[in-house]
Amino acid sequence: MDAVVAVRDDRSVESITLFGTMDERESTLGFRPQKEIPYNALLPYADQLDAESVYQLADIKAHLARVIQLRDIKVGGVHWCGQLAKYIRMFGLKFSKADHLTFIRLVYELVTIPELDFSLVHKFSQLLITLLKKRELIPREELVIQWRPLHKLLETVVYSPYEHLGLVLFPSGNSRRQNLSMLRKKSVNRQALSAMHIGDVDSGNIEQVLKNLIRACRIYFPVEATQEMLDEWRPLLCPFDVKMMQGIFFLEHFLPTVVYPKEHDRSFLLWFEELIGLWQSCSNNPSWEAHLINLFSRVANDRIGFINWEPYLDRIFANILRSFHIPVGSKHVVLATSAHNTIDGIMPLCRWVAAMFGNGSHVQNYLDKLFKALESFYHPSNNGRWSIKLLKFLSGLPLAFVKRVQRERFGKKSWEPDIPVAARLTDDDITRFVNSISPVVFTAMFSKIGSTDSAAALHNLASLRPELVIPPLLEKTYPSLETLTEPHRLIACLQCCVSIARPMLSHAKHYPEGRLHIIPLLSLSLPGIDPNDIKKSLITFQLLSALASLVPIVDCSEAPQNRNDLSEVEIELCSATAQFEDFVLQFFDRAFMLVENSIHQHTRSDSAASDKMSQEEMMLEVCLLSSSISILQQCSTPIYSEALSRLYRFACDSIFEIKVAGKFTADLVRAAIKVRPEIAVKKFIPGLCEKIIQRTTSEDLSQEEHLDNEFLWNLLLLSQAVRCDGSCLVPFKEVLTKVLQLTLHLKCKDAQEWSGTLLRYLLKSLSSIYALDFRCTVTDWDLPLTEYLPIREWGKSGDLFNLGMKWHVPSKEEKAFVEHLLNTFLLTELKRTRSHCDGNSVMTREELLQCIRIVSHCLVGTGACLPHWTRFESVSLIESLVELRRYGNTASCDDDEITLEGENVRVLVSSFMRPLLAHMLLSSEDDTKTLVEIIKVYKLVMYYHGSLKDEFEGRWKNRHSIKHFMENKLQKKKTHIRALLVDRTQLQHELRTVNQAPKVFTVLHRDLFLDLHHLAVSRYMEVRKVAQGALSTGFQMFAYSYRMILDDTIKYLKDDPSIEPHQFKGALYVILGENKRSLVSKRSWEVMNKLWPALVETKHCEKPSVLKVYDEIIDRVDRNIETTELSLTVSDSAVNAAKEIWTNGSLPKPSLPSATNGELETGRAVERERNADNISAYLELVNKLVSSAESGSLGWRFHQVSLEMLTLLIRYDIRFPSSAVRLFVTNMVNSSINVRKICTAGLSAILKLQKRKHKLVEIDPYAVSGAPRPLHSNDIHPGDDRPDNRWLQYRQDGFPKDEEQWNKTVFVEKTHWGYYCWPTKMMVYAPSSEQPPLGRSFEELLDDEKPIYEAFTSKEFVDQLIKFLSLEENKGKDHFHEKNFVLFKGLFRNFDDTVLPCLAPHIERLVADTSHETHETSQRCAAEIISGLIRGSKHWTYTKVVSLWKWLMPLMKIVITNFTVESIADWGTCLATASENRDPLKISPLLELLMDNPLNGDGGSFGDSSRMYLLQGLISQQEWRLPSVLHRLYNYILIHLRHPYKAVRDRLGSTIVSLFLYDINLPNGSPTLSPRRVMFIEHILPLLEPLKDSLVAEAGRNNEAGAVAPDPQRATEGAEVPMEHAPSTEDSSEAMTMKNKENSNNSNDIDSAENSEWKSNINLCKTVLKTLQGIYTRMFQAGMPEMLKLLPVICLLESETKDPELTRECLVTLGCMSQSQMTPELILPTLETIEEVSRLNSWHARVAVLGYLQVMVFNNLFLLQSEAIASRIRRTVVNLMCDEQLEVRELSGVTLGGLLHCGYLKIDDQLMNQFKQLSSTRIKKRSRDEMVPIELMIKRHAGVIGLSACILAFPYQVPDFMPQLLMLISAHLNDPPPIQATVKKTLTSFKRTHLDSWHDHKQKFTDDQLVVLTELLVSPNYYA
C-alpha cells in the first residue's frame, strides 16, 4: 500500500495523468486542463473524446458569453449554464485555469444579479459550487469573491421581511401558501392529499443551496472581509434579542477561516477571543450556541496548530457531555433548555475534538474520561432517547480523526497552508485514540438500534490500527458463528466484519495475521445462508461478497514446495488456500438449499399479485446474484470448473416452479456464464437450446395456454444464459434464432415472457458496450505459482494506471447477428402490424399484443446502438436571442449505423406504430393492453438509448453505498479495489450512453407527443395513466416541450358539452404532472395567463375522483409556485465579465465572436420589451382572475380558487391593481370563513405593499450621547451601563411635552442597537414632520388605496367585518390571530386615524363585553385591533399620538379589569406584540398604566397574576432599555413575595427572572443597571434564616426521637429492635394523648401566630424556588456563589410531607441547580455548601444533598478534575456512609457507586481497605433480649455498602478485584438486617446486569468462586 501511495505522489509531482503528462495534454488540447475525469481515458472510444470536448467547450464559451451580453438570462442563460454543468459532468474541469476563473466570475455575476428569480439563483448557485469544488486548483491570491452580494442574497431568503406575508415565494416553501393549502384542506371535504410532497425536500431548498455556495466561496473572500463582517454584525449581538441569532448565524456562515499564517491577525484572531468569551459567558445552552459551536469547529479544523485550546477543554467537553442529556440519579429532572441540542450538532463536535489533538494537547485524557463516563450508556441494555446521539458521536469521531490523519499524511498537494509539524498527530496519538474508543464501540455494536454506526466506527478505526481493532472483533465473531441461540449478536458481528474486510487485508505490514482469518470467516459464515432468517442471509451474502471481491480464490497450497521466498504467515496462508475449493462448492450447496426452500406457493392462482416475488425475495435474489458473481469471478479455472459442473448438474437435473426458485437458479446460471462465458456458454446453451427445439418440434405447443415447468425452466435458464459476452454467442447464432422463432409466438404467457426476455438480453449482449473483467487484479491467475503468487494480491488496491480494462465492443459479426435478428423479428412484426391495419391479415388481440411486445423487446435490446434520427426538421419551442443547441455524446467506437431497409430503426418503428395507433383508436379502443404496449414503444423510440436516467442514478447511488464500506478513507486518491474502479468506468460509459442523444425536438417528436396527448385523455384509465407518464418524461427530457400540447390540453377544460368527462379528467392529470413538475406551476407568465383562468372557469363536476385531482392541482399551485420575475435587468458587471471569454487568451477560442455594439443595444431593447411584456401579462392575468371572480358564474369552489390564485400573485415589487384590491375588500365580509381568511391574508399583504417609504436619517450615537468615540472598532464593551448608550434608556418623565420636543427626540425602535456596539452607519426614522403626510383626503389617495379607504370608512362594512371577526371559529382552540393584527397594523400605518372613527365604537363595545357567550371572541377581536393600532401609530404626529393615548387609556383600564381566563392570553399577546420594536418612550402611557399597583387585589389571585403577566410581556419586549422601570417593579415585588396565592407567586417568580435576565457578565462588559441577582439573594437570605433555624431545630428533635424509635416501615431493614422493647399500640395511643394535651395547654395562645408565620415563610420560599427555577433555565448565566446559600434551606424543605407542592418545587429546583453548568469560581463554594448540608441534623437534608451531589458532579465532570476536589467529595460521601440514618447510608452508597461508575473517583487500595475494615467490624454475639450496638451495626453496614458500591459501579464488567469482593460480601448474607437486605440487593443486581454476557464474565472467576456464586444466585429447585 505504501509503495502504491509513493508512486501516486511521484506521478502527481510529475503531473502525469491517464491521458499523459500535462505538457502532452497542453500540446494536444491547446491548453492545460484543470482536472479531467480520469475514467474517460479508459473508455474504448477515448480517442474521440478530445475533439468532442474541445468543440463543445468552444461552443459553450461563445454561447454562454453571448447570451449574457444579449441579456437573455431566463431562457438562454439557463440553457447554456446547463450545458456547461453537463460538460463538467462528462469531462470534468477540462478547461484552462484562465477559463476556470472566467467561468467562476461569470457565474458569480449571474448569481448576484439584482432581483433575479430565486429558481435561477438556485441553478446558477449549483453550477458555481461545482466550479469551486476543487479548491486546490485555485489559490486564494488568484481569485477574490466579494461577500456582500452573497450576504444580501442569504439575508433576503432567511430573514425576508416579505415572505411571511407571501409577497415573495421561495422555492423551499412559503408560510402563506402553506396557510392557503391548509384552508383548502379544511374547505374541501376530501381524504388526505397524496403524500407526493413528503419526499420533496432539500432539492429545491434555496436556503441550503445558498449556505453551500457561501461555504465554497468564503475561502476566496478578501482578507479585509473579516473586519467588515464584524463591523456589520457585531451590533446585532444582543443576547436578549432575536437579532442575536441572526448575527451569530451570519458570522458562522461567512467568517473566512482558511487563510495564510501571515493573515491570522486580520482574520480569526480579530474575533476568536471575543466569541469564545461570549460562549463561555452564556453557559446555559442559549438557542444560538449551535451556530457558535459550528464556527469554532470550523476554525479548529482549518487552523490546526494555530489555536491553543487547552484553556477551554473543560468547557468544551462539559458541553459535549451535556449535549447527550444523560439521565443521572433516580429523580432526574428534564430541563427546558435540553431542547436546543439536536443530532445535527454532533458532527461539528466530532470535528472540533479531532482538530484539537496534537502538540502536547490533553484532549486524549479528556476523551478517556468522557468515554469512561458514557461507557455504560452504550450498553445494549441501557437504551433511551440519548442512544441515537451517542451512536452518532461514536461513528462521527473516528471519521473526523481519520480525515485529519489523511489530511496530514496522505493529503493532496495544495496551496493551502500545511499543518505545523509540531501539531501533527503522532503514531502514539493514533494508538491512544484507537485504544480509547475501541472498547466502547465493541459494547455499542450490539445496540438495539442497530450496529450501523458501530460498523462505520470500526471501519475507520481499523484503517488506523487494524492490529488493535480486528482481533477483538473476531473474538466476538467466531463464537457467534458457532451458536444458533443469538442471531442478533451474529448479525451485528457479520455487519461489523463487512466494514473491516478491506482494512483486514490492506495492512499486511502492520497486521499480517489478518489474512489468515479470511478463509475461516468465509467457511464459518456459510450456515448464515438460512431460508428461515432472511436478515441473517442478507448480511451473510454481503460479507461473502465483500471478502470474495478482495481475494483471488486460487489454491496456492503447493507454493511452499516451489518457492523459498515465503514468510511464515505466507506459508500458513498458502496451506489454508487448499480449502478454497471446498468453500466454493459448499457455497453453491447452500445456494441450492436456498433455491429448494424458496419454492413459490400461493393459494389463489387468479391473483395478479401471486405471480410477483415479495420484497424480501427480491432482495434475496439480488444478494444471491451479487455474491455468486463475486465468488465465481475470483475463482481460478480449476475451482471455477468444479463449481460450474456442480451448478450444471443441479440446473439440468432439477425442475422447480419458475416464479422464485426458477429465477434464483437462473441467476446462478447467469453468474457462472457472465464470469467465464468462453467456458460456460458451451456447457449450457447447446443443451438448453436442444431441449427446447426438440420439445417444440416434437409437439405442437403453439396453442397451449399452459406449458409444463420443464419447458419453462429450460427457457428461463436460456434467457439468463445469454447475458454474457456477446462474442461468445455468435457461434450459436442459428440455434438461438431457431429457438426464438419457435417460442416467440407461443400462446402460453410465461413462454412469451421468457422468450421475449431471451430476445431482449441476446440483443443487448450483442449490441452494447460493457466492461468484462471485474476481478480484483489484472494478472492471469492460472500462471505457475513460481511466476505469480496470488496471495500477495489479497486486498490490493486497483491501479488506475494499470487497470487492464477489457471491454465488449460489438464486432462486425455481432452487428451482423443483430441486423439478422432485427430483420427476422422486428421487421417481420412491423410488417404484420401493417397488414393488420390494411385488413390483409387481421390478428387477434393476443397476437397483436405479443407482436408489439416483440417490437418492444427489440428496441430495449438494441437501444444503445440505435442512433436518434437527424433528418427531421427541429421545432422551435421558445424564443431566444441565441441558438439553444444541445450536444450528444460519443458512446460508441464507430459510426456504423444499424438500419432496417436502409431506414433509421427508430423512424421506421414510428412509421409503423402511428398508423397502427390510429387504426386501433378507430376500431378497438378498448384493447387497453395493446395500447399500453404501444405507448411503451413510443417511450423507447424517443427516450431510451441503452439505459434510463432513473436506472443509472440508482446504480450510481448503489456504487456509492458499496464504496462507503470498501474505500480506504485514510489514503483516498482513488485507492479503491479494482472492481470499484472498473464499475466506476462502466458508469462513466453509461452516463455518456444516457446522454448520447442530442435531445433536439423535431417534427417527429411533435407528432409522437400529440399522439401521446390523445391517449392521455383516453376513455380508459390504464391507457391515460401510462400516456400521462410518458408525456411527463418527455417534458423533463425536452425543455419547453409542454408548450406543444398546452393549448390542446386547455381546450378540454372549457365548459363544452362535447367534452367528455374522461377527456376533462385526463387533461387535469396532464396538467398535474409528476412530483413538482406540474404545468400549473411553470414560471412563465404566458403559461399562467392561459392555464390559471382556464382552471378557474372550467366546468363544474361533482365526481369525487375529478374533484380530488382538481384539488391536487390547486394544492400544487399553493405549494410549488415561486415568485417569477417581472423586470429583470442584467447588470453591467455581468456583461463585462462575459467579455473576458474572448480576452483571457485561453484556447479553445470561442466559436462565435463577441456581440457587436448593435447586438448589445438590441439585447437591451429586447430586455426592456420583455420586462414590459411581463408586466403587461401579469396585469392581464390579474384582471382575468378578477373578472372571473366578479362574474358571479363561478361555484363556491372555483370562486375560492380564483382568490387563492390572486393572493399568490401579490408581489413585493409591483402595486396590485385596484380592481383586485376592491375584490379582496368586498370579500372580507363574505359568508365563507375560508374566503374571509384568504382575503384577510391578501389585504394584509396589499397594505404592506402600499406602505409609503419613510425617510431615514443618519445619526451619530456618540454625538447624541456626548460620549467619546472608541479609537478602534474592535474596542468593544458590551452592556447597558455605558455613557454612549444611556440616552436610549427609558425615563419616567421622558415623554415629550409638545410637538417640537417630539420632533427633536431621537426614537430608536430597534432594541438590539447600542447594547453590544453601534452600527457603522446608524439610520433612524426622521421626525414625523419630515415623513409622508398623514390625514390624506380621498382625492389624494392612489387608485389601489381608495377601495380600502372607502370600505373602512363605511359604517356598514365595518359593522359587518367586526361581526365576522368576533365570531368563534373553533371552540376552545381560537387564539390571537396574527393575520388580523397585521391587517389592522397596515390600516393604521397607511391611513392613520382616518379609519379609527368607524372602528372606535366597536373597540369600546368589544372591550366592555363581559357576557358569558361572547366575551372571549369579543375581547380577542379587540386585542387584535388595539395591538395593530398601537403598532400602526408608529409614524403618527405628536397630536395624533396624544389623542390616541387619551382615548386608549380608559379602554385599557377597562381591559385590566374585564379580562377573563379565556381572554388573558390574547391580551398578553396583544401588549407584547404592540410593544415589539417600539421605542419605550412611545408606549410610556401604557407602561405607566400597567406599573400602577398591579397587585391591588382586584379580581383576586387571577386578577393579580394576570396584571403581572401583561406587565411582564410588555417589559420583556423592551429588554435592557428599562432599568428604572425594572428597579421600580423589583422593589414593588419584594413587598409581595409572601403572597398567599400560588398563581400570583408563580407569576412573581417568573417576572423576577425577567428582571434579572440582563444580569450577565460579558467579556469586557460592565455590571448591568437593571436589578441583579445578588441584591435579591441578600434580601431574602435574612428572611429565610428563621425558617432554616426552625427546620434545623425540628430535625434535631426528630433525630432524638428517631434514635429511640426508628421508622416502623424500616424495621425489617434498620437496626433490629426486640419485640419486648417495642411500644404497644395502647402505649403509643396513651403517650400521644398525653402529649397532645400538654401541647394544647402550653400553646393555645401562640399556635395561630406560629402557623401564620410558618405559612408566610413557606410562601416566601415557594416564590424563591420558582425564581431559582427560572434563573437556572432561562438565564444565560445561571449559577453564582450567593445562590448556593439557599441550598441548605432547599434540602431541608425537600422532604416536607405536609406540603406536596413545596416538596415538588424543591425537587425541581434541586434538579435545575444540579444540572447547571458551573464556573471555576463556583466550585469551592459549592463544595463548602455541600459539606455544610451534610453536617445538618436533618437526615432528609443529607439525603437531598447526596442526590444533588451525584448529578452535579456528572454534569460538571471536567470542571472537577482536581485531586483535592475529588478527595473532598469522596470524603464527604464516605463519611455519610457511616450516618446513623439508614436512608442516608443507602443513598451514599448509590452516590459513591455513581461516582465510581462514571470514572470520577477511582477504586484504590486505601478505599478498599477502609471498606474491608468497616465491614469486618465484629458484632458482639448477643442473647435474644440484647440490642445490637447501633454504632457497630452502622460501621459494619457502611463497609458492606461501600463494597456493594464498588461492585455495582461496574454493571456490565467484571474487573479483577470484583470476584474477591463478591466473596467478601457474600459472607455477610446471614448478618442481621439491614445488612442482609443490602447483600441480597447487591447480588440480585449483579446477576441481572451480568446475565447477558455471563459466558464471558465467568472466565474471571475460579471454580470455587463459581460454586459459591451459583449457590447464591441460582434459586433452589423445588423438586431437588
Image (cartoon, helix red, strand yellow):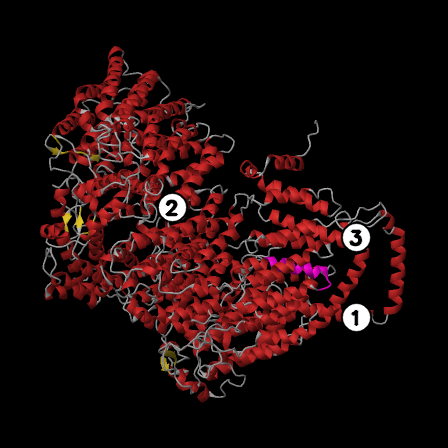
Residue 369 point in image, percent of width and height: 50, 55
Q: Residue furthest top?
A: 698
The front one of 373 and 1674 is 373
Residue 813 point in image, percent of width and height: 13, 27
- Tell me which amino acid carries mark 2: Arg
| Distance between the alpha carbons at the discs numbered 3 and 1 | 39 Å
Residue 1210 is at least partly visible in this image: no
- Tell me which amino acid carries mark 1: Glu
Quarter of the picture containing the N terminus is: top left
Identify the residue position indicated by label 3 in the image.
1829
Q: Tell me if residue 1724 comes above or below residue 178 in the rendering.
A: below
Q: Which residues are magenta?
A: 1736-1750
Q: Residue at x 74, y 44 (%)?
A: 1871
What secondary structure do most residues of the magenta stretch adopt?
Answer: helix
Kindly state the secondary structure of the residue where label 3 is placed: loop
Q: Nearer the viewer, mark 3 or mark 1?
A: 3
Local crowd at mark 2 within 10 Å, few (<14), some, or many (≥20)? many
Identify the residue position indicated by label 2 in the image.
465
- Residue 1650's label in the rendered image is 1
Q: Nearer the viewer, mark 1 or mark 2?
A: 2
Quarter of the picture containing the C terminus is: top right
The front one of 1543 and 370 is 370
Q: Earlier in the sequence, mark 3 or mark 1?
A: 1
Q: Is residue 1737 magenta?
A: yes
C-beta proximity under 8 Å, tags 2 and 3: no
The front one of 643 and 1020 is 643
Quadrant in the picture for residue 495: top left
Q: Tell me if residue 705 comes above or below residue 949 in the rendering.
A: above
Quadrant in the picture for residue 1033: top left
Report whether 745 appears left or right of 1491.
left
Q: Tell me if residue 544 comes above or below residue 1009 in the rendering.
A: above
Q: Is residue 593 magenta?
A: no
